[in-house]
Amino acid sequence: MRAFGAVGGSPVFIRRGKGARIFDVDGNSYIDYVLSWGPLILGHTHPSVVRAVKGALREGTSFGASTDVEVKFAQIITRAIPSIEKVRLVNSGTEATMSAVRLARGYTGRNKIIKFEGCYHGSVDSLLVKAGSGGATFGVPTSKGVTFSVAKDTLICPYNDVDEFWRIVKRYHRRIAACIVEPVCGNMGVVVPENDFLLSLREITRKYNIVLIFDEVITGFRFCFGGVQNIFKVYPDITCLGKIIGGGFPIGAYGGRKEIMDCLSPQGQVYQAGTLSGNPVAVSAGVSVLTELEHLDYTRLEEKTIYLCDKISKVLSDKNIDFCLNRFGSMFTVFFTSTKVVDFKTAKTADTKRYADYFWEMLKRGVYLAPSQFEANFISFVHNEKHLQYTVDSLINVLAKGI
C-alpha cells in the first residue's frame, strides 16, 4: 500500500500530520481519509496523546517487566468489551491473530482453521491463503514463502455465505480448532455482514465446540466504545485488537473467555511472549486514546460519514457512473462497479483502473484516499464540515474531467 502498487506512480512521502491533515515532504497538504489505516480516530498529534507519550518517555521506554499502566489498560478494554474476561498484550494486530489461532489450537487440540476469502488477518503464514477452485478446498498460499504444508490446515469460505460455512464445518468439524473473521470487513474494501451471518457463525461454532475469533483490529473502538460485537450483540470466544487501541503506536491485544486464556503460559502450555509487549509508551498512548473515546459521541462521527457518503453517491449517480458505496459507521469504500459488493468475488468486479484515476485526481486536489480499490477509508472526530464539503467539491471537479 505504501508503494502505491495498486494505483501506480510514485508514492507520497509524509513529513507530519495535524488534526485531519497530513503534509508531505514537498509541503503539500492533504485531507487524510487513511489515518494510518484506521488508528488515528482522534486525528493526528492529538494533544492528550502527545502529553501521555511525553510523560511515559520521561519514565523510560521499556522495562521487560510488568507496569501498572498495563493493568489500567487491560481494565479499560475488559470494561468496554464484555466478552474479553482476560487480555494479553502484544506488539501488532498480526501478532494478535497469530497468537489467537495458536491459542485456539492449544485449547481444542485440533489443527485446522476456517477463514473467509478476502479477509486479511495480518502477515501470518496460515492466514495468507485464498480459496482454490472450489469453496471447500484447502487453502493455497497467496505469498511466496508460505508452504503448502502450512496452508493445507486453512479452510476457505466465501464471506456472507452461511450455507457454504455449514458444509465445510459438517465435513471437517472434528479437526477444526477455530473460525477467524473480520466482523465488518475492511481489507477487501468495506463489506458488511448480511442478515444473520455473524449470529449463524456463533451458533454453528458453539454447536461444534469451534473457537470463534473476531478480528477487531480495524473495528475495535471504531464504531462505539468497544467492539463491533457490542453493536451486533454477537460475542466471540476470542477478540483480536490493534490500531485504535495504540493511538498510532505499535500495539496489539487478544483476549476472551477465562478458560481459554488460562491455557496461555505461565498458567497453561500455550507459549507466547514478546520483549516489547506492553511497552509503556504504547500503552500510555492507548490509555489516553481510550479515555478520550469513552466520553465522545460516536453518533456524531457516523453522521459526518453518512453526510459525506450521501454526497458522494449523489455526485456519482448524477454522472451515471457505475458504483457501489459500502459504509459501516465511520468506514467507507467506493467500488467502481454496478455489482452489489457482498464478498471478495463481487469486490473483484470493481474497475481498478478507474479507481486509480480517481485516486490520483483527488490527490492532486489535496484529498488523500486509500491508495487501493480494496481498502477502507476512515473519518476521524476532527474531520469537519469544511473538510467534507471540500472533498465533495473536489470529486465534482474530478468528474468534470471525465474519469
Image (cartoon, rainbow, N blue to C red):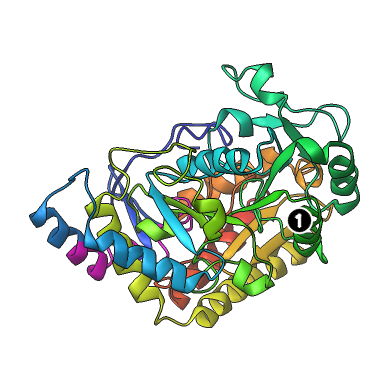
Question: Which residue is found at the position 41% from the left and 78% from the top?
Answer: 294
Give the left or right position of residue 46, taking residue 167 as reference: left
Quadrant position of residue 331: bottom right
Question: Is any part of residue 366 visible from this angle?
Answer: no
Give the left or right position of residue 96, taking residue 305 as reference: left
Question: Which residue is found at the position 42% from the left and 59% from the top?
Answer: 244
**The magenta segment:** 31-52
Dominant secondary structure, magenta:
loop
Count of labels in the image: 1
Residue holding disc 1 = 323
Give the left or right position of residue 113, taking residue 9 as reference: right
Q: Can you give x and y, in whole percent of width and height, for residue 276 in the image?
A: 28, 42
Any magenta on residue 20?
no
Circle 1 packing at 10 Å, graded few (<14), some (14-19), many (20+), is some
Question: Which residue is found at the position 66% from the left and 42% from the top?
Answer: 108
Identify the residue at the far left of this view: 58
**Element class at badge 1:** loop
Give the left or right position of residue 278, taking residue 300 as reference: left
